[in-house]
Image (spheres, rainbow, N blue to C red):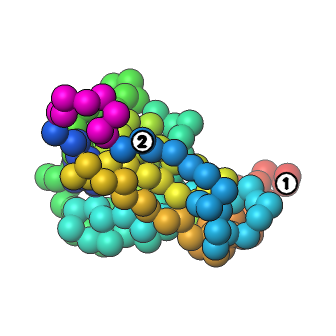
Amino acid sequence: MSVARLPAGDSGQCPKRSKPDAQPILGFSDEDKIGTIQPHDDALVITLRIGGYDVKRVMVDQGSAVEIMYHNLSKELNLKPGDLTPYNSPLIGSEMVEVDFIVVDVFSPYTAIVAKPWLHTLGAVSSTLHQKAKYLSKCQVCEIQGDQSVARQCLVVAIQHRPEAESSAKAERGL
């Protein structure tokens, strides 16, 4: 496991104002569900700018404490071994907009997973129900729209995936 530190988002901070109600409030309403297929239980899968590239199939995981980048993406971003550092400490996030990704070499239908550290650093609020993440940038509410079609494709790929090594190891043991 290795760590890659890459920019992934916008700080979204508004200048301090004298009135406490001057800053927009982040929230969701039924209008935010327009354009989504309801009811659903789809993951929030977005396209996110990472390392200067638009990266598709990034899952937003509100319950995870660490950002994950899969090995194939690190190769596509041309990250060299010198760009990565060994990771052997507890899985915690940073307080900068720069995100520490754990690079793992395992199968995933996703290219990356952003989690609580990214959400908190960006000041973002996400909703799988509404298929959106919202954050403040220059005192305006910005939205990142999820893609339910891609989320469902990722789910199908994950369900259909049969690990070659695991299957052959079980076959050799007679399982």
Q: Secondary structure at mark 1?
A: loop
Q: Main secondary structure of the magenta part?
A: loop
Q: Is residue 163 visible?
A: no
Q: Amino acid at mark 1?
A: Gly
Kindly report which numbered mark, 2 or 1, lies closer to the viewer in this rendering: 2
Instruction: Write the residue at 34% across / 34% down.
Output: 21
Viewer-side residue, 174 vs 6:
6
Q: Amino acid at mark 2?
A: Ile
x, y percent for residue 171: 79, 60
19 drawn magenta: yes
Marks 2 & 1, CB-CB < 8 Å contact: no
Q: Which mark is residue 25?
A: 2
Q: Which mark is residue 174?
A: 1
x, y percent for residue 120: 37, 36
- Specify the segment rendered in magenta: 16-23
Mark 2 packing: few (<14 Cα in 10 Å), some, or many (20+)?
few
Quadrant of the snapshot with the N terminus: top left
Q: Earlier in the sequence, mark 2 or mark 1?
A: 2
42 drawn magenta: no
x, y percent for residue 131: 59, 60
Q: Quadrant of residue 117?
A: top left
Instruction: Write the residue at 26% across / 71% down.
Output: 53
Q: Residue furthest top?
A: 90
Q: Quadrant of residue 42?
A: bottom right
Q: Quadrant of residue 143?
A: bottom left
Q: Residue furthest right?
A: 175
